[in-house]
């Protein structure tokens, strides 16, 4: 029996104008992802930029996310064919790309991540395709291509001055589904690390938000501060990435220990 297809829930919720909340996976492990599935979060970002994960470990977390009703996003290190292809074949539903500075990087991303006619992704019926037994593979190769192209999100990060300067061109690239604002790296790139109230940082944020919303694409932003979540929603964010697995765990223990000692 062919495997039933499951739509990308992050994309579906965006289309339904729902606000979404997720977190970074830095500590990792399938059990961590399984536990987070009980939290009520909408998605996770498995961080292969800063995290210690290989493809096989990432695939295990993606599989657990699927069983836990979490959309699995993977942040890669940079845009190379191998980085993109391996994560998509493992089952990543969204690819996050850090440190974007040029439009060419995004054109390469689309070329590696999307099948014909949008790109040149290498053809393989890996686990995302049910190893060739998923419903979408049973109705011709182009149907499979179209399904994967439609259900795979490509979300570059705007976290450099260079990206801010060309943001209108970035959001116009066909195949790019949204922008993830990294405020910490962005503030550092603009010469005011961690100072989100600096006029140049606020102006950059406003410019990026305006460009993304005008293009009708998904807007995602990160924060360590839970009080910022609603503020970012009010500013136009569709999805907020709140903290990380390890930060939330340590903070919770610190808070509990303080209460116990008092």
Image (cartoon, rainbow, N blue to C red):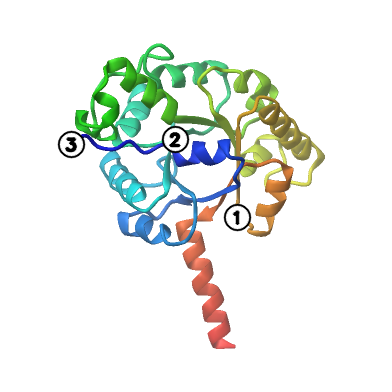
**Residue closest to the eye, 147 or 45:** 147
Residue at coordinates 29% horizontally, 38% vertically from top-left?
A: 4
Name the front one of labels 1 and 3: 3
What residue do we see at 37% from left, 55% from top?
33
How far across and down, in percent of the image, does residue 187 sit?
68, 40
Q: Element under label 2? A: strand
The image quadrant of residue 32 is bottom left
Establish if 212 lies above or below 63.
above
Nearer to me, 144 or 126: 144
Mark 1 → mark 3, Cα distance in angstroms? 44 Å
**Quadrant position of the N terminus in the picture:** top left
Q: Position of residue 136 (x, y in %)?
A: 30, 27
Q: Residue at x 37, y 53 (%)?
A: 68
Give the spatial CA distance, label 1 vs label 2: 22 Å
Mark number for residue 1?
3
Of pointers 1 and 3, the one earlier in the residue sequence: 3
Q: Secondary structure at mark 3?
A: loop
Characterize the local packing of mark 1: few (<14), some (14-19) or many (20 or more) Cα atoms within 10 angstroms: some
Look at 37% across and 25% down and name the residue there. Answer: 147
Q: Is residue 98 above or below residue 175?
A: below
Q: Earlier in the sequence, mark 1 or mark 2?
A: 2
Work out whether mark 2 precedes mark 3 in sequence or the reverse, and give the earlier one: 3
Residue on which the image places disc 2: 94
Residue under pointer 1: 224
Residue 193, percent from left and from top: 68, 44
Secondary structure at badge 1 equals loop
Residue reaching furthest to the bottom? 262
């Amino acid at each position: 029996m062919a495997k039933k297809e499951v739509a990308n829930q992050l994309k579906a919720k965006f289309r339904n104008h729902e606000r979404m909340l997720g977190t970074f996976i830095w500590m990792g492990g399938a059990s961590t992802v399984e536990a987070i599935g009980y939290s009520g979060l909408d998605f996770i970002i498995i961080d292969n930029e800063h995290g210690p994960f290989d493809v096989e470990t990432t695939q295990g977390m993606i599989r657990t996310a699927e069983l836990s009703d979490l959309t699995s996003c993977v942040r890669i290190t940079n845009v190379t064919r191998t980085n993109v292809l391996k994560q998509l074949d493992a089952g990543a539903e969204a690819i996050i790309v850090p440190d974007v500075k040029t439009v060419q990087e995004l054109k390469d991303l689309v070329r590696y991540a999307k099948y014909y006619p949008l790109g040149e992704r290498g053809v393989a019926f890996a686990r995302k395709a049910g190893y060739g037994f998923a419903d979408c593979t049973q109705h011709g190769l182009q149907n499979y291509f179209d399904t994967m192209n439609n259900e795979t999100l490509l979300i570059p990060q705007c976290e450099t001055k260079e990206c801010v300067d060309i943001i209108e061109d970035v959001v116009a690239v066909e195949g790019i589904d949204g922008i993830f604002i990294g405020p910490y790296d962005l503030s550092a790139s603009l010469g005011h690390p961690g100072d989100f109230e600096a006029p140049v940082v606020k102006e950059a944020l406003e410019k990026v938000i305006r460009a993304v919303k005008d293009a009708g694409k998904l807007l995602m932003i990160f924060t360590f501060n839970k009080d910022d979540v609603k503020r970012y929603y009010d500013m136009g964010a569709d999805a907020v990435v709140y903290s990380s697995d390890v930060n939330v765990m340590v903070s919770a223990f610190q808070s509990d220990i303080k209460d116990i000692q008092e």
